[in-house]
Image (cartoon, coloured by chain):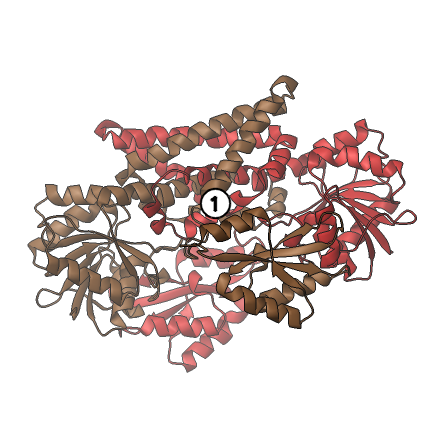
Chain colours: A brown, B red
Amino acid sequence: MIRTMAVVGTGLIGTSVGLAVSRHGVMVHLFDQDETAVRTAAALGAGVAGAPAGPVDLAVIAVPPSRVGEVLAEQQLRGLARAYTDVASVKSQPARDVLRTISDPVSFVGGHPLAGRERSGPLAARADLFEDRSWVLTPTEATSQAALNRVLELVALCGAIPVMMESQAHDAAVALTSHAPHVVAGLMAARLQTGPEEAFRLAGQGLRDVTRIAAGDPLLWGDILQSNAAAVAGVLRALHEDLSAMLTALDDLAAAEPVRERHSMATIVDLLRRGNAGLARIRGRHSGEPASQVRLRVAVADRPGELALLLGRLRELGVCPDDVTTSLAEGSGALFAEFGVPAVRAEPLRRTLSEHGWHAERAVRAPDLREEVLSKP
Amino acid sequence: MIRTMAVVGTGLIGTSVGLAVSRHGVMVHLFDQDETAVRTAAALGAGVAGAPAGPVDLAVIAVPPSRVGEVLAEQQLRGLARAYTDVASVKSQPARDVLRTISDPVSFVGGHPLAGRERSGPLAARADLFEDRSWVLTPTEATSQAALNRVLELVALCGAIPVMMESQAHDAAVALTSHAPHVVAGLMAARLQTGPEEAFRLAGQGLRDVTRIAAGDPLLWGDILQSNAAAVAGVLRALHEDLSAMLTALDDLAAAEPVRERHSMATIVDLLRRGNAGLARIRGRHSGEPASQVRLRVAVADRPGELALLLGRLRELGVCPDDVTTSLAEGSGALFAEFGVPAVRAEPLRRTLSEHGWHAERAVRAPDLREEVLSKP
């Protein structure tokens, strides 16, 4: 069991680790080159400033990726802890540094908590920063089971979910899901330096969302991008090619060249469609597959506001109105609302709606029949 | 006063307009090529399907930018309304179309409510979609005051804030604040089509935010981008150049060319810094200038968690902890927390903190003195 810990580097992540484990009674020793940062972390309750009397159970090296190898070697040399981990958002380069320096790879497990804020430094720290977040661990063949278990306990104390990965797979994944998006947000935000002040009266939530993460510390992010340069460049090179195609199409449309209009529009719509498709991969990933879904169809009476009443009732009954579609019956022109529900809920829901005066039935369009057939074992 | 209206095009925006004005007792007539859409809008309570007996007070043409001119001409010919507006997110191209067709420019005012959702269609509509949002109006010299006043009344009924602009200034502004960000989000989202499934376990809120607006309808957005192609291309061309510079720097770092490392890092950090600076232009724009700010400095006792207690108390007293910084006194090494407050609040806050055992005083560092001098009339 972890009773004592050291945190080397009391920035956002290091201080948050200190706050999180201190809640569980772990004695934490805090280090940082910056005396203000370490005193601030201590005053926040993340631990005590300064060195422990003997080796602690686990040391967290919370410094930028390029410094992990060097700091780890230094701390192992002085015998700071029995096991070590880091929190850098790049894993291959630090792992190579560890092997190249005098570090001992047996007691070290690379780690990366998938949590952060746009603000940095100890004052941005929060004890609950890691709760329910993924925390990647990259043990190697050299890693001892004892060290791995210490770090798994740290992840549990922080309320995070451990995810074991190879460092290279991790770095390719974060290049795509974190580092390239950071660059893209930064490049878009940089464009906002241009433009008259009045333009920003038209800035909405969309722009704020696209650019939000661009507020990160440029020096820290420079270090991250350097440590994962090849993987990030791979993602951005493909994006650069798509952007070139988009620009050519927009230039042709701006020049109003009728002969190329159809082709240019096809290029643009295709790129936007690929965006839709990519987005689907990170949407509702935790909702699981609708293993056995049934579509219900409810007749909507021909009175203004009748559909709004039905949607309100469905919301109360736990059906997300975003999943509702409408259709007109051929011939009669009657309006129907349709939505999918888990098969086990279909009949109770149908009865409840019926009690409230809505006639509901299973939708019998061909695709729904097919869905039902497919969902059988 | 508007008593009757028509909405031509019952998608997200048209239906939301119908819902918003129906709350105020306006009689709304709904039209759409798509019979399901118009029946759905009516069933939601946005109005009644079909044509009015005589001309209505105001018609809203809620169709994609490229179709505004043609639909307006058609409706003016049949005498649908006494005044007309549109809601397209591009203004110059539709205005040119209006002048080129047989449309009457006197009764028409171009409009663009700055509101939207990733979802489209009448089922995504909301009566409060426009509340407290900007709604750009682009009257020309030809526009009658009567028509302008009708549209201003519509904006008021929807709870939005009217902003008068020239169409070209509007289009340049939305190219920067909406259309280019949409493309950027789409291109990043398109990258997510690649990558193994396990990579998306590492996807966090940052990626979701950067790509969220990429969920928009590709056909509608294709139309928008075509109608504003030159302005959007201008923004994206500059971004393309920055991306090229970023790629060259990353390639050099990946190749570990020591002779160019310093230059490459400088390029990357400079681009990220420009992102920080651009972001500052859309941050806290409504908070106003701190006309007369005083910085208070509070000594933090040397006990673990003491700063956390102070931050909690400050939050209760209305000071945002995000504005707090810490510093160490030279010599004694005592820790201080510093934050800015409006001058009128400084003394009461100082007394309140003192009653709770914290010694607070005005910070007297040179920059703060300067701030106080500058803020004098």
Judge left or right: residue A325 versus residue A113: right
Residue B83 x/y as whole percent: 85, 44
Residues A341 and A215: in front is A341
Residues A313 and A231: in front is A313
Q: Which residue is drawn at 72% across and 37% down?
A: B166
> Is B353 situated above or below B364?
below
Quadrant position of residue A241: top left
Disc 1 marks a residue whose amino acid type is Thr
The secondary element bearing badge 1 is classed as helix
Q: Is residue A67 visible?
A: yes
Q: Which chain carries label 1?
A: B
Q: Residues within 10 Å of mark 1 (few under 14, many from 20)?
A: many
Judge left or right: residue B370 versus residue A224: right
- Quadrant in the picture for the N terminus of chain A: bottom left
Q: Which residue is drawn at 13% across and 65% down?
A: A57
Residues A262 and B254: in front is A262
Q: Residue at x 16, y 46 (%)?
A: A69
> Is A5 situated above or below B1?
below
Residue identifier under label 1: B211
**Residue that lies at the very extreme toward the bottom in this rendered image:** B355
- Quadrant in the picture for the C terminus of chain A: bottom left
